[in-house]
Amino acid sequence: MRGLMSKDFFTLKKKYGWTRLLIDIAIMAMLMFVLEDKGALLISFLLIPLEIMSVVITLATCDEQWKWSKYAISLPVSKKQIVGSRYGFATLMASTGLVASLVVNTISYFYFPMYAYGFYIFVSLASFAITMLFVALILPSNYSLGVNAGFVMMLVLLGAVLLLGFWSSKHENAILRFVVDHFELGSGIAALALIMICGLSYALSVSFFKKKHA
Amino acid sequence: MANSILEVRELTKDYSDFVLHNLSFTVPRGVIMGLIGENGAGKSTTINCILNAVKKTAGQILIFDKDHITDEIEIKDKIGVVFDENHFPDIFTPIEIGTYMSGIYSNWDWPAYRSYLKQFQLSEHKKVKDFSRGMKVKLAFAVALSHKAEFLILDEATSGLDPIVRDDILEILIDFVQDENHSVLFSSHITSDLEKVADYITFIHKGKRLFSCPKDDLMDKYGIVSCRTAVFALLDQTDIVAYRKEDYQVKVLVRDRHLAAKKYPEAIVEPAAMDDIMLFYVRGEQP
């Protein structure tokens, strides 16, 4: 598993590199500077999930290009481990996104204080949850129908986020108000649902991968 | 320790349009087993079943005397595999490949890996995409040999390579089986390579095993009888494996050329090359 995740890390390093990281940081800084308090929300709910999804799709594209799965199967790793390592790496990426989101939200709290700090932490955790949800939907699409399906799924999810954001802002932040009104129950249900979706996603991906090599 | 490294028993894989049917053969320790057959005969399917890359329909596969599915990871830790094409990320360098392979194989041997890279004249820091096809195959061998593998599986690994590189690779294989606990399963349709290095030959045709025997027996016993049609009509049918009619003569593949030379003094009997044997079995007419 460690070796497979190292391979993903090297791929990411080679495909993205420091330049991409600096561009990402510059985009984040610019969004915060231009949009002020709304910048952190946009970064957390759109930019970070988008970037993590793009990483996952890039890794799948490279694997397909290199016909990696054929070789991976000859290595001393199980099919579950091959799929599991991709989920592990995506979770690692989502955690990095969480840290980035926490940094952005903390800066936003100090420079454009609109809410209590707890709200900003919540936004970061929600960003992590959204990223994981997206990963959980993209990976089985990749394993069942290939990279293009994952890419289409990414576009659909982005569209859904934009629509929800637009709808919420038209209805006096309906989503935010719903979350505040039902915070504890809502968070609990969301966390449980996310764990279940991720578990189901992993099981589906393993099943698709095994079917492909049956 | 078991005498055989690989035992394939009545292996069947049923795709709707192709069936690998009841294939059985054994790879003893310390030998190179050549797996021959025309394209689409079932060589790669056999290897994919051995590696559990595809699910077999029936049969049993034992590697190191263990079931290839139950003990899959333990078994694969001691197997090196080289395919016909490069599967390494082409943006990686050999050192980066070694780094992640060291996290996959429990017995990864860095000094051995570096030594193979040096021996094969592969730059440690050059990207795989800048390597020639021969260099990529050598890199695959360096990886396959650097984790104390006892069994090498080669799936058309030498196809598309020039004779110099192929010769280098054959030398690697001969070196590898100097240790009598090591074996190689070498699938190829370049029969001249197998004539040079193989100890045993298993021939698959249309998903069925035609024979599996020591190469020397094959080369020593099989022969081509060249004769006129009139003489051909007098040949004992049981001596004939297959025949091909040419303009003025008939060429006949026989299992025992020494016997044929005695029985048919009016015919010309020559040793059969592996290519001839394959060609007669695949293209020849049955008596």
Image: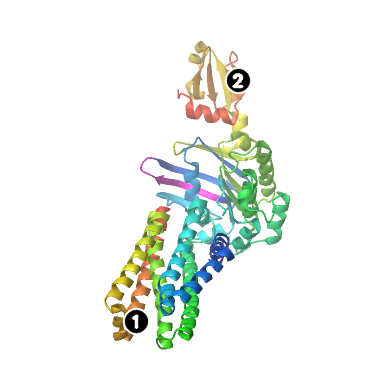
Query: Which residue is the site of mark 2?
Result: B269
Q: Secondary structure at mark 1?
A: helix
Left or right position of B35 against B147 = left
Residue B24 visible to the viewer = yes
Q: Camera-side residue: B128 or B38?
A: B128
Query: Residue at point 48% right, 14% down?
Result: B233
- Judging from the image, mark 2 belongs to the subunit labelled B
- Answer above or below: position of A192 versus B252: below
- In three-dimensional space, the C-alpha distance between marks 1 and 2, rounded to whole angstroms, equals 86 Å
Span highlighted in magenta in the image: B6-17
Mark 1: amino acid: Ser
Residue A187 marker: 1
Q: Vertical placement of A170 versus B176: above or below?
A: below
Other residues around mark 2 within 10 Å, as few (<14) / some (14–19) / many (≥20):
many
Report x, y in % for residue A84: 46, 66
Query: Compared to B109, does B279 lie above or below?
Result: above
Label 1 neighbour load within 10 Å: few <14, some 14-19, many 20+: some
Colour scheme employed for the rendering of this structure: rainbow
Q: Which residue is drawn at the image coordinates 66% and 36% (left, top)?
A: B163
Dominant secondary structure of the residues highlighted in magenta in the image = strand
Q: Is residue A128 visible?
A: no
Q: Nearer the viewer, mark 1 or mark 2?
A: 1
In the picture as drawn, the residue positioned furthest to the left comes out as A171
Q: Residue at x 54, y 46 (%)?
A: B26
